[in-house]
Image: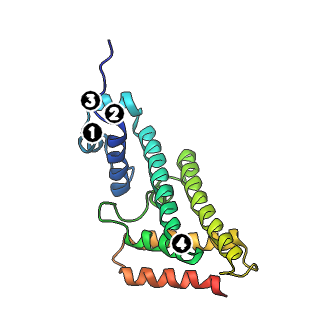
Amino acid sequence: MARSKEFDESVVLHKAMLLFWEQGYEKTSLQDLVEHMGIHRRSLYDTFGDKHSLYLKALDRYGDLMSAALKSEASRGNSARQALRFIFDFMIEKGDDMPLGCLFVNSAIELAPTDEQIDGKTSQGFQGEEQLIADIIRRGQQSGEWGAHHDPELVAESLHNSLVGIRVLGRTSAGKEKLHRIADASLAALDK
């Protein structure tokens, strides 16, 4: 008779995601994962497979959480402009319970050049974020906030690139004031 799991799979996956986000893939050992997740090595393998498989699942979890968070932030806005501002502010001001930077950015830098699966996951995550931004720009164009001369996909690519840069700078000693200035300049492009 099989033993039932003595842990919540979602909770321990979240712990693994946070550890990978903070330390990166290569610097996170199996022992680090076992200790941080609070499960036995055998349980890790039985539930998630090897370290790489666990990392892919952690990226999926991160993608789901970020997608939900960004959509939630955008929905708080009374206007398209405010929706974009809330997304930028969230990326700059996100809570102390979250590691600095972005797991997608970290993964793209550390692993995507040599790992097709990681490249696919990070690209998919970035595309989802760009699509959300493009949809908000279209909404702003329909409401008359911005002119129809803007290509929503092109502007979304540019704004997303600014968000990625903000996430990278967020891991450095750059102050939040600087990050907000970058956000302001990026969003001002829609007024031209």
User: Quick one: quadrant of the C terminus?
Assistant: bottom right
Which residue position is annotated with label 3? 6
Residue at the spot of label 1: 34
Does 46 appear above or below 124?
Answer: above
Could you tell me the amino acid type at mark 4?
Ala
Q: In the rendered structure, which amino acid carries the disc numbered 3?
A: Glu
Residue, disc 2: 44
Q: Secondary structure at mark 3?
A: loop
Give, as a three-letter code, the residue at label 1. Answer: Val
Q: CA distance from mark 3 to mark 4?
A: 41 Å
Task: Measure the alpha-carbon separation of dots 2 and 4.
Answer: 39 Å
Q: Mark 2 or 4 closer to N-term?
A: 2
Secondary structure under the numbered disc 1 in the rendered image: helix
Disc 4 and disc 1 in contact, CB within 8 angstroms: no
Q: Amino acid at mark 2?
A: Leu
Contact check, label 3 and label 4, Cβ < 8 Å: no
Label 1 near label 2: C-beta < 8 Å?
A: yes
Q: Nearer the viewer, residue 152 or 144?
A: 144
**Quarter the N terminus occupies:** top left
Q: Nearer the viewer, residue 107 or 189?
A: 189
